[in-house]
Image: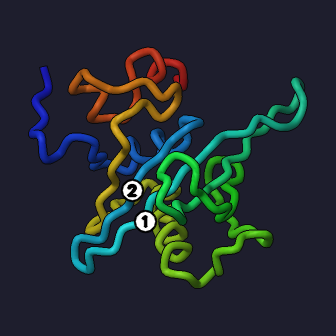
Amino acid sequence: MTTIKNELRGRLHTPLFAKAYALAGNATFTVLNPESGNRFTFKVKRKDVGTEAEPKELFFVGLLSGADNEADYSFLGTIFDAEKFVHGRKSKVGAEAPSARAFRWLWSRLAGDADFAPAEFWHEGRCGRCGRKLTVPASIERGLGPVCAGAGQ
């Protein structure tokens, strides 16, 4: 059985787990730069588009921009084909704002399966797909419950 120290609870360490969590469909996570102390919280929601014959997925990225960490998210951009992030033309957050630059940097790392150190990736303690509270150490470690982790395979 995997043991996770309390201070690491909710932290994803690998690009594989971080990307899988972010693209699970209903993910909320915080990215922290321990050197500067800057942190930004993002929400990534999946939208199924296209046709049955040619299904496609879009992922809409929101930035926490207010005090209500459930509802105060501003549209930041879209992830296409689970790989390419494009800053939204209708985003009220400028493309060169620190939060936008941080997400763009993070996504370039995750899309290429590259290490994102020194940044830290923290999930909210809930499954990135169904939103259920995570209690099993292996589920906390990957950010997805056992059923949802198998659903993407």
The alpha-carbon separation of the residues under discs 1 and 2 comes to: 5 Å
Q: Residues within 10 Å of mark 2 (few under 14, many from 20)?
A: some
- Which residue does the image show at 66% across and 55% down from the upper left? 79
Return the disc, 1 or 2, that comes first in the chain's sequence: 2
In this view, the residue in front, 107 or 4, is 4
Instruction: Please state if 41 lies on the left or on the right of 60 as rendered.
Output: left
Residue topped by disc 1? 40
Relative depth, front residue between 113 and 72: 72
Q: Secondary structure at mark 1?
A: strand
Residue 94: horizontal and vertical position, in percent? 65, 80
Residue at (47% x, 39% y) in the render: 20
Mark 2 secondary-structure assignment: strand
Rendered image quadrant of residue 39: bottom left
Label 1–label 2 contact, CB within 8 A: yes
- Outermost residue toward the front? 67
Amino acid carrying mark 2 in the image: Thr
Question: For the residue marked with disc 1, what is the amino acid?
Answer: Phe
Q: Horizontal placement of 140 versus 109: left or right? A: left
Residue bearing the label numbered 2? 30
Is residue 29 shown above or below 102?
above
